[in-house]
Image: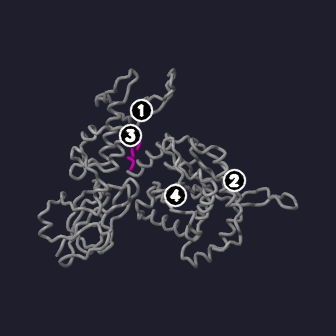
């Protein structure tokens, strides 16, 4: 018998650590090759870790809700034979039973395919992942401060959660009071026995200030015994932080266009049966919207950009993110890479594949990276229009509303007439730092034009 060391695999270029969410297999369970062993969560996406070999799960080295670094050995699997066959790209290796027993459990580490690329060593001797170092740089944490943070990761490493907790504590300790001094923590005795209050921070204008900057004023939310307190899960906290930062970063402006998509709806109704029979899957409106957006981005490349300080980064690729609601109620945005180079059939298959994997928590971290523009279909919830928040570091996001039958004026060669048409609203939120009203308005109108002028005889 031999023992296979299962390492936490690489899950994307910018991903260096993951949280162990749930063990799907327990010690003693037999595992087939490619069976999922555990669920992990990164700051990008949740996914399963499959077994590259068949065998019996022998030992787990990380508890649920703990954080592991890429390359850490997270479990051992007992396999048949003297040594399992190595496969290219496998994150793990086989060792003899006697060797495995000589290595302490959680300290059992093995060199991954590229550990030096994901973790760097500081002069102090501590290791910091690129993610932790980036957060420290963005938040102005000095090397001395970073060294003082107690790490909960393997071998005392500082994880993302460690540094976020440190920043939260630092923010509370440095919270100013009206007299300019640091606010002291509330003593337990100051809380009434029969009530509970939660302190939050609210931004209010500071009247009389020369710079007109908002000041932080503490407010309290009274909580009655009948109220229920629900702690945000990890993904909801990430979404909340992302949305707040987006509004703080970009001055949002929104433009609206109403489109007559009667030809498009009738065309889809005509071909959808034959398409499903031929391809084995349905064709929805989402890939059609993505195709129109891709064409418009080629026409207006200054919408397919990002902002870096005073620099405008013009993106060569057109990668469209599509917002998808998860069964948990959370939101995720998988990305279709090079959407402008795909046919309508290719777009339809990509949309269906990403949507199915999103619903089943099978997305890979790379599936949510690299987007240059986002589409959100709020019409799926019966909404006619909305003002979505930009998905940073992009500069625009398009919301498509529900398609409804409405009376509309139809212009003909013989005069105007009233008819029943399929109508929908498109709303574009954009970053007014770099996208002016003229550009934003022309762009969303161009998307509407592509949808309105749909060829009823198009083959797919």
Tell us which disc is closer to us: 1 or 4. Answer: 4
* Region of the chain picked out in magenta, as a range: 227-233
Tell us which disc is closer to us: 2 or 4. Answer: 4
Q: Disc 3 marks which residue?
A: 225
Q: Give the quadrant of residue 215.
A: top left
Q: Disc 2 marks which residue?
A: 258
Vertical side of 435 occupied by 179: above or below: above
Q: Give the quadrant of residue 283.
A: bottom right
Q: Disc 1 marks which residue?
A: 220
Is 243 placed left or right of 126 in the picture? right
Q: Are marks 2 and 4 in contact (CB under 8 Å)?
A: no
User: Is label 2 in a helix, a strand or a loop?
Assistant: strand
Q: How many marks?
A: 4
CA separation in Å, label 2 and label 4: 22 Å
Q: Residue at x 51, y 45 (%)?
A: 307
Which sits earlier in the primary sequence, circle 3 or circle 4? 3
Pointer 4 local density, CA inside 10 Å: few below 14, some 14–19, many at least 20: many
Which sits earlier in the primary sequence, circle 2 or circle 4? 2
Is residue 243 or residue 157 the one in the foreground? Answer: 157
Tell us which disc is closer to us: 3 or 1. Answer: 1
Pointer 1 local density, CA inside 10 Å: few below 14, some 14–19, many at least 20: few
């Amino acid at each position: 018998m031999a023992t296979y060391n299962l390492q936490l695999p690489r899950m994307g270029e910018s991903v260096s650590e993951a949280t162990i969410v749930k063990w799907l297999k327990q010690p003693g369970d037999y595992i087939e090759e490619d069976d999922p062993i555990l669920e992990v969560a990164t700051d990008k996406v949740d996914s399963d870790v499959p077994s590259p070999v068949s065998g019996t799960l022998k030992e787990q080295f990380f508890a649920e809700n703990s954080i592991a670094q890429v390359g850490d050995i997270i479990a051992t699997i007992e396999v048949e034979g003297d040594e399992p066959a190595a496969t290219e790209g496998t994150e793990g290796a086989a060792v003899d039973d006697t060797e495995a027993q000589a290595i302490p459990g959680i300290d059992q580490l093995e060199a991954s395919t590229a550990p030096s690329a994901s973790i760097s060593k500081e002069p102090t001797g501590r290791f910091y992942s690129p993610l932790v170092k980036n957060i420290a740089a963005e938040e102005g944490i000095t090397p001395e401060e970073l060294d003082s943070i107690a790490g909960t990761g393997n071998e005392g490493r500082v994880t993302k959660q460690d540094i976020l907790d440190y920043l939260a504590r630092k923010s509370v300790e440095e919270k100013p009071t009206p007299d300019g001094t640091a606010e002291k923590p509330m003593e337990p005795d100051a809380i009434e026995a029969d009530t509970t209050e939660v302190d939050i921070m609210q931004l209010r204008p500071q009247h009389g200030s020369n710079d007109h900057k908002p000041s932080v004023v503490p407010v309290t939310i009274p909580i009655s015994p009948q109220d229920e307190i629900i702690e945000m899960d990890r993904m909801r906290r990430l979404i909340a932080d992302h949305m707040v930062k987006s509004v703080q970063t970009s001055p949002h402006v929104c433009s609206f266009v109403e489109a007559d998509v009667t030809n498009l709806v009738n065309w889809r109704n005509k071909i959808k049966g034959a398409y499903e029979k031929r391809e084995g899957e349905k064709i929805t409106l989402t890939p059609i919207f993505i195709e129109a957006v891709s064409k418009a981005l080629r026409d207006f490349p200054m919408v397919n950009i990002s902002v870096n300080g005073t620099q405008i980064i013009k993106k060569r690729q057109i990668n469209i993110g599509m917002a998808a609601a998860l069964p948990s109620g959370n939101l995720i945005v998988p990305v279709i890479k090079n959407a402008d180079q795909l046919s309508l059939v290719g777009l339809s298959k990509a949309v269906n594949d990403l949507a199915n994997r999103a619903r089943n928590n099978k997305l890979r971290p790379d599936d949510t990276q690299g987007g240059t523009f986002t589409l959100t279909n709020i019409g799926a919830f019966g909404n006619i229009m909305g003002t979505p928040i930009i998905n940073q570091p992009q500069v625009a996001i398009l919301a498509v509303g529900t398609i409804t039958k409405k009376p509309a004026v139809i212009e003909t060669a013989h005069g105007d007439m009233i008819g029943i048409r399929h109508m929908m609203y498109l709303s574009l939120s954009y970053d007014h730092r770099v996208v002016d009203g003229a550009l934003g308005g022309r762009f969303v109108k161009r998307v509407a034009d592509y949808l309105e002028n749909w060829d009823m005889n198009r083959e797919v």
